[in-house]
Structure formats: structure tokens, C-alpha cells
Amino acid sequence: MKEHTPGGPPSLPSQVQVQRLQNQHDPTEGEVFGLTTNEGQVIAVALVAKSEALKHDLSLLLPVPLTCIGRFQVCKGNHAEPTLEEGQFAIIWDQQELHIYMQEEQGVSTGEYIILSQEEFNEIFILAKVHFSLDLSSKNTPSSIRNVIQSLTEQLESPSACFRLQNSNLLLQNSEEGILSLGGSVTDGTETVGSAFKGSGKKKTSHQVAAYQLMLNRSSVELTDAPVIRIDNRNATVLSTIFNGEAIVYLEKSTQVCYVAELLAQGVTQQLQLAEFWMKEQLSDKKLHGTLTSLNSLHYISGHVVNVIYPDDVDERYLETYRKAVHKALVFPFDRPMMRRANRLTPAPGSKSAALTNTHVGLKPSTVDGDVRIVPGTYGYHHYMQNRFDDNKWGCAYRSLQTLVSWFRYQGYTEKPIPTHADIQKCLVDISDKPSSFLGSRQWIGSTEVGYVLDSMFNISSKFIFVSSGAELANKGRDLSIHFETQGTPIMIGGGVLAHTIIGVDWNAQSGDISFLILDPHYTGSEDLSTIQNKGWCGWKGPDFWDPAAYYNLCLPQRPSCI
């Protein structure tokens, strides 16, 4: 790969790194990982703190081609001028302001940084996913494991490593030419990635994704000697596992296609190095066992992809020590899951929901000029008649509960499936809230029952707000705003015979004006986002949306503090 000379101040994607630094109160320091684009723009993507808790290279947690491009430090008050290598920079947070230092030819100088929006960041890169399945079999010794990984690494670094672009006849090879066959609009290896995958992203706010399949071309290896077979009759224990992997690589859109295979091979190599770590861990810890699976995460708080793999047959609780070490190394918060299996970038087979997600994205803003607070992360829109189940006119609270559970699933708090109406009814009967005749009925439930189910089935506690009139909800702006800022969970609200889900609020503290972002479970149509938004099934509603003659109960789920 050719090198690019950096120029100008460093760029940070959105406010993620700044916020993470400003949330640190204890002195700490580490490295800034990122890259220099083809145009010489320095982009800082991830923070990696010094850590002795992890037994593998911290850089393996980050995708190719990120490398160390600078340093960061959190201190209290005065600080010394950092020592930097040529072309590097430093970010220092002294509990009051951020200081930027640049290493130039004449010495270290103070500088500035640029904040990139998520849309700007997504315009520069494509996420390349490389799917692979490798048989990792060796004797149960560290040296044997090392030899197996080294052998596969050598294949990846050779022309035998080929990558087939999904739904295309484009086949890339890790060689000087970089290409075996071309198709579609790609006519030359010098064409850029952005041209090759033009239009692969549906939303500017989303990452464009290109999916590849690793294919090891055995016939490309030249043999100079006849094969030799050695038979060893000694007893030996064999450690064998299938590694179902998915390497994630950042592809700059201005990169030429002929360089892509080399980057993809590096991504798979990093996954193999993580697999080597886990295989060696299995030798000494018998509780670690099962197929190795990639669980690359792109959490809305991290701001960047994180590479993790876990053995399949291991309980989440047993992996908590490792997750804590990862959180500490990447300066992640310790009060929410980001590295659990449920946080994976690509959903597990069979786990994908038919429900639309984040149906509020693209809506026109509220007319209230206030402080807008919206549910962070991802939720699913559950409504009447979904999954071919007829709950029209009685299942709105059940559907609202399903939306609440979907948020906890997407954020990684649970891997339990979204409960069906039958599951919900059985739970309420089991805890003696309802009689056995409730099973299979079409009886309504309210916010209290929603709280019971969240607590019993998912160990999620809730707070409640009660108002005697819908008109009183106009005075709850502060309470709702604080909830979305601190907890961020969707709210189930029931009044009269209707239930809705509140996923945001726009509240002006000075004027008292308020608008509610409502997800209406009474929708009976198909998963058509245009209809859902244009017909108001998901939209901003004023105080007059609520019935002044009805009392309302609000269930506010509380986010568990865990990782």
C-alpha cells in the first residue's frame, strides 16, 4: 500500500471521542488509532488506553487499516508538553478543555481538531465484511496452535487468498494485480472502491457495506517437491474447532480496487490472531469451549467497529472479566453492554426481526423549539397484526411491550426472544397477577402489567408516572426529558383503552411547550415506512393528542447498569 503524507489538523468522527475523554475523571493515557486518507486527512477513530488486563495485542480489537497515529492523556490541571514522533499528534483533557499538540519539523506546537459528522465519516469509508469458515485443528499445545495459525496466515498473505464480492462476479486476489475477474461497472483495477460500489448505501446516515466471501485457491500454490506423508503412532489430544468468522475492514472510497484484497487479507489475519488467543485460553480453562464465532460490534456509543470473538458454548457471565478489560482498554463506559453477543454488527442466523427499526429517522422535526431528547440506539416498531397474529383492538399494550423489549435486545442487555402474546399472558399468570382463564384470552393489559413482565422475564425494573388527566401530560416535559437523557429507554403509556409508545420529547423549559414523539401500535398495515411516517403512525404529537378525560399511566423501564 502506498503511504500518504498527513496534512492539517486531525479529524474526529462526531463527538464520540471528545465525550468519552470528557467523561474520564481519573488520570489515564494511551494511544489514538486512526489513519491518514489518500488526501492526507488525519482521522482519529479510536482511543486505546494502556492495559495489562488483556493478554493479546490491543490493536486486534480494531479493524484494518487503523494504526497508532497519536496519543491521548487525561489529567487534572497542569500537564507537560507531550513527546511525539514526527507526524503524530496528542489530545489532552485536563478536566476543563481539550488541548491538541502536533509534532512538526520545528518541534511540538499547539493546534486544533475538526469534528466530522457521522454523514461525513460515512461518505469517506465503506465497511467491508469478509465471511469465512476455517477448520482450526491442532494438538493441544501452544506451539501446535501457533503453527496452525501461522500456516493459515501464510496462505492469506499469498495469491491463494481470494475474495468474492457478494452478488457479483468480482473476484479479488491477494497479488500484485489484485484482480482475477471483473464484472459490472468495474473495468480496471485502478478504479476506486467508491466507483465500484456506488449506490450500495441506502441512507447517508448508514455505513455502506460490501460483503465478501473468503475463498482459498489451493491450486495457485506451486509445489516443487512430491508430498511426504508421515504417520505418528503416539497418543495425542487434538484440539479442533470451526471458526465462523467475519472480519470487518474500513475501505476508503478513494482506494483503488487492486489494493482491496491485501486489506481484506489483513482483516482475516487479525481474526486468526484473536482465535489463537482463545484457543490457548481453552487449554488452561475448561469452561471455555465451543465453536469460535466473530461478534464484531458497531455500538452507537463506540462510534467505530470493535473486533471480538467468543467461544459459542460459554455463558455471558463467564466472559464478563474479559469484557471489562475490553471496556477499560477502549475507554468505554462501565454501565452498559457494548461487547456482548447481542451487540454484534451482523445479527445471528434466525435472530433478525421482521419489524422495522428506528422508524422516526427521516421525520420532519417538531415545531417546538426546545430540547429534543430521543431514544438512543435501535428499537423495533411492533404493531397490530404483525407475524400474522390478529390482535386488532386489544393487543396495543402487548405490542408496546414488544417494542420496549426490542430496545433492550438491540442494545445487548438480553438475548431472550421478544415475548409473544402467549408468553406475556403466561408470565402474568405464573406470577399470580392474572387467573388461569387469562391464558389465550383477548384481555387488555396496562402499564403495570408491562412493568411486571419486564421485571419477571428480563429482570428490568421500571418507574411509573400517574396522571389523572391527559392534559397533565403537558406538564411532564422535565420528567420525560430527564428520562431520555439518563435512561434512554422507550416509554409505554396507557390511558383509557389505548396504549402507545413514547420514543422522544421536545420540551421548551422557558415556554413550557412540548411535543411527544409517538410510536402508535394500532397500525395494522404492512412494514411500509412511507405510510407509517406520512400517515402519522410514527410522528410528533402535541398535548392535544392525549384524551383530557382519561387518566394515564406511564411505564419507564430503567436501564440496568452492566456490561
Image (tube, rainbow, N blue to C red):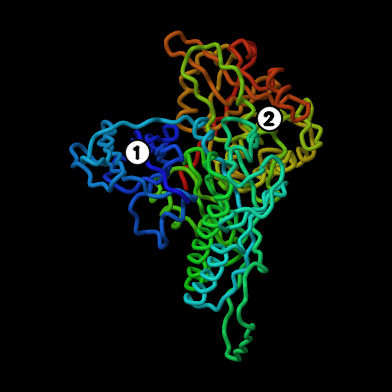
Q: Residue 219: x and y, percent?
A: 67, 68
Position of residue 190 measured from the top left corner of the image (x, y, whole percent): 58, 44
Specify whether residue 316 is in view. no
Residue 157 is labelled as none
Q: Is residue 296 left or right of residue 75?
A: right
Circles 2 and 1, Cβ within 8 Å, touching? The answer is: no
Q: Considering only vertical position in the picture, is 395 above or below 72?
A: above
User: x, y percentage for residue 142?
Assistant: 47, 75
Q: Which amino acid, mark 2?
A: Ala
Within 10 Å of the Cα at label 1, are there few (<14), some (14-19), or many (20+) other Cα atoms?
many
Quarter of image, res 413: top right
**Front residue of 58 and 199:** 199
- Residue at 46%, 28% (x, y): give it: 485
Mark-to-mark CA distance, 2 and 1: 40 Å
The residue positioned 50% from the left and 60% from the top of the image is 318
Q: Nearer the viewer, residue 476 or 512?
A: 512
Outermost residue toward the top?
A: 511
Q: Nearer the viewer, mark 2 or mark 1?
A: 1
- The answer to whether residue 292 is above or below residue 306 is below
Of the image marks 2 and 1, the number of the one nearer the N terminus:
1
Label 1, secondary structure: give it: helix
Inspect the image, locate mark 1, and give the three-letter code of the amino acid beneath it.
Answer: Leu
**Residue 397 tag number:** 2
Camera-side residue of 94 and 171: 171
Which residue is denoted by mark 1 in the rendering?
21
